[in-house]
Image (spheres, grey):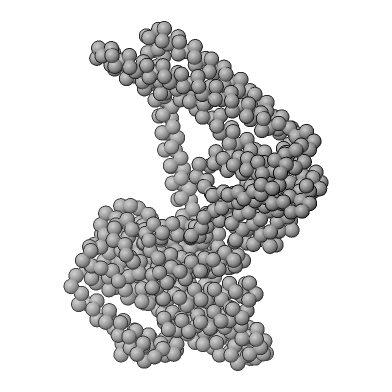
Amino acid sequence: MNQIARKVRTLCCLMGITVSALCQVSDSIDTLRVKIPTAKNDTIRMILLQQMATSFEEISPDSSIVYAEKAIAIARKLDLKLEEAYTMGDMAYGYLNLGVYPRSLKILLDATAIAENEESERKILPAKYPHTLERLSRSVSARRQRLDVLGLIQQFSAVLYGTNAGQFEKALYYYKHAVPTAREADNKILLCNLFITMGRTYNTLKKPDSALLILQQAYQFAREANYNKHMGSILLNTGRVYVALHEMDKAFTFFKRALTQSRRDEYFRGVVATDLELAKMYRLYGKPDSTLYHIKDAVSLAKRLKTPDLRLRSYAAMADFYKKVNSDSTVKYQELVIDMNNQIFNSGQVQQFQNIDLDAQQRQQELKATEKDYQTSLKLYGLIAGLVLFLMLVIFLWRIGRQREKSNKVLQQQKADLEVALSNLKAAQNQLIQSEKMASLGEMTAGIAHEIQNPLNFVNNFSEVSNELLEEMKAELGKGNATEAKAIADNVKQNIEKVLNHGKRADSIVKSMLQHSRASTGQKETTDINALCDEYLRLAFHGLRAKDKSFSAKFETNLDPSIGPAQVVPQDIGRVLLNLINNAFYAVTEKQKLGISPYEPVVKVTSKKMHDKIEIRIIDNGIGIPARVVEKIFQPFFTTKPAGQGTGLGLSLSYDIITKGHGGELKVETKEGEGTTFIVSLPV
């Protein structure tokens, strides 16, 4: 039996795989090995080499690299860029498993450059050579094949930065790019693998609830694609999540299932990792014999896999075990741990990895700077073109005489009206800033201010629109077509009438703005609570839409008609509602960015009369509030939003308005990853 078959047989025997399964594995590799020299052409030989590289990715990374190099040489010879990039991903994964992280990163960056370039779609593998590799799934078009390759490379990059290099934020950056790529390619197998490693990353970042949701998605994708290769990994990482949630019985059950599944599917990395987790569980249950059995199983298999990170973890577990029982073997395994640490994390390799990463970031910044310069040039050319058009407009208006004077008179009047409107608006805004120091007030005015921008834009753009019409009129007059020229003149007149209408509209908006921004008198008034809830829910939604056109969320109301009017300070209660509703919309938007599917962002406002009080609930299905910070959210200047997006005063001031100003209560109910409910209780 040849060397490759012997290696596979050794691993299979280690795993307790049946003779039948062993023969299948060995025969499969032997078959590929025999077919390579006798392949009819280079294309078939390249495909066979790729399959060999994939087969050895985790059981013999050095062999995988050798076969990948041969496949890459053929892909370059045939000018098949996508095949080259895909096989480079295999090679990078091999180096990753060997612990040669700088080399892996360099190859991944080169492969990414190929896969991101749409020119790589120009020549793809002919349809008569159907791939058996997972990456192509059902994809047939050149674009979908490219997205398959790009998504796979992005996943390898995320694994490199997260699981192996410990740079989890960088890993999440790649996951957030890879998930949309895989969705567009409709590759459920790739999505499954992405969500597995992404779930592990979230669990490492101490976000077990999010990790559990993501792993459930991975399981669903695996079922839909009938894909079992990494089912053991899903079970293993689910068990790790339950450990983080302190549900040890569930964790133990999932680890046992993961070990059985990984052995069945010959997922050797999963067997080692699961053995180590079970060893921890048995130690927790006070069973040293079972603990030692699983550690020895992990050490034995990790040695044969020649994967440094698995060997390091296995040796560390063995050293820790012997240290607990005061065995002489402790020193032996501690020395092995030190050797593996020096091999993987030596200063030269770490520095080389950092240098490659910094070079890549610098190239990215240079590309962005080039793009910025290009956009600046476009703006400059646009400005020059606008000036030329303006000069042409002035000349043309001078020629039409009376028409010009009439148009200028209307434009001047509208300009004056808008200046008055802007002056009134600024005065109103200054008064609001002096009387209220709540950040949520800006949200209330955003929608109205956005509406004022519409007539302003109309006036500012009128010169450009009129210029186009007048240019057409000039052309028609040059042709002697007076009838068409008159028709165009009528269109210019209609535009001027629209300017007048929009001027009146601006005046109306300013009056509305002044009404909304009226300073609070501090006096309680008889107020329709339901109408107030409905008004501020819509005002918050439209205010956010005015700031961000991509913002989208569903909102609902369930208001109790039996409440009737109540004695409150309407401006203060309105600002509390606006602040809480804005927070709810922010929470659902942040959850939507995670790419979890299916998910529909919903914000709901309800009211109910309860004996001697009125209860208002603002409910969202967003990201929730972490348990460790719930008690702090009503403290001044405390915020969970990123720097620059929140002052930390909104909830504090809202709490004072409800409790001190109205003798009520403001409470919160939340669960991280599922949503939040703020409860406002007001005495009748």
Residue 103, above or below 403: below
Residue 135 in percent (x, y) is at: 35, 66
Residue 34 in percent (x, y) is at: 24, 81
Quarter of the image containing the N terminus? bottom left
Residue 214 in percent (x, y) is at: 52, 65
Residue 507, above or below 279: above
Q: Residue 427 occupies which quadrant of the picture?
A: top right
- Please state which of residues 664 and 360 is positioned toward the viewer in this rendering: 664
Any part of residue 647 in sight: no
Residue 523 in percent (x, y) is at: 80, 36
- Left or right, 635 with respect to 392, comes to right
Residue furthest to the left in view is 40
Residue 492, above or below 375: above
Q: Residue 46 occupies which quadrant of the picture?
A: bottom left
Q: Residue at x 48, y 51 (%)?
A: 362
Residue furthest to the front in view is 562
- Left or right, 656 with respect to 103, comes to right
- Please state which of residues 284 and 387 is positioned toward the viewer in this rendering: 284
Q: Residue at x 45, y 84 (%)?
A: 263
Q: How many marks?
A: 0
Q: Residue at x 22, y 62 (%)?
A: 126
Residue 49, above or below 300: above
Q: Residue at x 61, y 20 (%)?
A: 420
- Left or right, 329 with respect to 521, comes to left
Any part of residue 287 in sight: yes
